[in-house]
Amino acid sequence: MKFLFLVTFLLAVTVAVNSCSPSDRAALTVFKSSLSEPYLGIFRTWTGSDCCSNWYGVNCDPTTGRVTDINLRGESEDKIFIKARRTGYMIGSISPEVCNLSELKTLVLADWKSISGEIPPCITSLSNLKILDLIGNRITGTIPAEIGLLKKLTVLNLADNAITGQIPASIVNLEKLMLMDLSSNQLSGKIPDDFGKLAMLSRVLLSKNGLEGSIPNSISNMYRLADLDLSYNLLSGSIPAWIGSMPVLSTVKLDINHISGRIPKSLLSSSGLNIVNLSRNALEGFIPDVFHQKTYFTALDLSYNNLKGSVPKSLATARYIGHLDLSHNHLCGPIPAGSPFDRLEASSFQNNDCLCGMPLSTC
C-alpha cells in the first residue's frame, strides 16, 4: 500500500514539474493577445493548461516547467508553412508581459513583416536571455538603453525594422555577443568609441542606417571578427590600416559612405580578405600595387571614387580575382594583359580618364 502511494505521489510530482508554470502560462496568454496571426493558425495551438506541450514555438525546461524559448519565425520550412504554401504575417506588438518569463533564453519573433511598436525596455531584466531576434518587422522606438544588462546574450538581431536613436553606450557590455545585426534601420549618431570591447563578435552588420563619425580604432581588438559591414551610412574619416591585419576578417563593406583618404596597402595585400567593397566614397590617391600569389578576392569594388594612376600590374599575379570594379575613377594608361583582365567586361573599367586596352578600346 505504501509502495502504491509512493508511486502515485511520484507520478503526480512528475506531471506537476513537467507541466507549464501557471505564471508563465498567464504571461504567454497576454503576450498572445497583443499579436494577431490570421493565416497559419499558430496561436490556435496555444490552448490548454500545459504551455510546455504542443504550444507552437514554445519550449520549457523539463525539470522546472519554466518557459525557456519562444521561437516564432515567419519564414520557415516547418510543415505548417509548407501546408499553407505561404510565409507568415503577423500584426500587433510585443507585450511587456514577456518580461515576466524570467527563465527565457530565446526570444525569436522574426520575419513577420508587420509586428510594430517598441521593444519593451523591461526586456533587459531577462538575465538568462541568449538570443534576441526580431528581424524583419516594423518595430519602432529605440534600442533599450540598458541592453548591456543582458550579459548572456550571444545573438542580437534587430535588422530590417524602423528603429531610431543611437546605439546605446551600454551595448559594449554584451561580452558574450557573437552576432550583431542592426542593419536596415534608422539609427544615427556614432559607433561607440569602445565598441571593440565586444571581443567575441564574429559578425558586425550595421549597414543601411545613418551612422556618422569615423570607424572606431577599438575594433582592431575584435580578434574573432570575420564580417564587417558598415555600408550605406554617413561615416567619414579614413580607412584604418589595421583593418587589413585583422586575423580572421574576410569581408569588409564600407561602400556608400563619406570616407576619404588613401586605400591602406595592408587592405589589398591581405591574404585573408575575400570581399572588399569601398565603392561610392571619396577615396583618392593610387591603388596600391601590392597584390600577390596569395591574393584571393571573390569581389573587389573600388568604383565611384577619386582614384588616379594606373591599374596595378600585380593584379595579374593574384591567385584569384572574381568580380572587379574600378569604374568611375580617374585611372589612366593601358589595362594589363592576361588574367583576370581577359575575362572582365568593359563595365569594370568604364568612366575613367584615359584607360585603354582590352576590354576597352585599343591604346
Image (cartoon, rainbow, N blue to C red):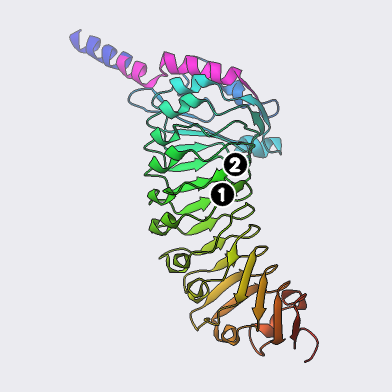
Say left or right for 152 vs 206.
left
In magenta segment, residue 31: yes
- Per the picture, the main secondary structure of the magenta-coloured stretch is helix
In magenta segment, residue 321: no
Q: Which residues are magenta?
A: 13-36
Question: Where is residue 254, by image quadrant?
Answer: bottom right
Q: Position of residue 310 (x, y in %)?
A: 65, 84
Q: Farthest right residue?
A: 361
Between 309 and 99, the residue placed more toward the observer is 309
Q: Farthest bottom residue?
A: 363
Label 2 amino acid?
A: Leu
Say left or right for 240 vs 299.
left
Residue 243, above or below 4: below
Check if mark 2's residue and mark 1's residue have beta carbons within 8 Å.
yes
Crowdedness of circle 2 by 10 Å Cα count: few (<14), some, many (20+)?
many
Residue 171, above or below 270: above
The quadrant of the picture occupied by the N terminus is top left
Residue 35, above or below 139: above
Q: Farthest left residue?
A: 2
Residue at 61% over, 36% down: 163
Q: Position of residue 66 (x, y in %)?
A: 39, 23
Residue at 47% over, 65% down: 243
Mark linked to residue 187: 2
Crowdedness of circle 1 by 10 Å Cα count: few (<14), some, many (20+)?
many
Tag 2 secondary structure: loop
Q: Position of residue 220 (x, y in %)?
A: 41, 59
Label 1 amino acid?
A: Leu
Question: Where is residue 188, by image quadrant?
Answer: top right
The quadrant of the picture occupied by the C terminus is bottom right
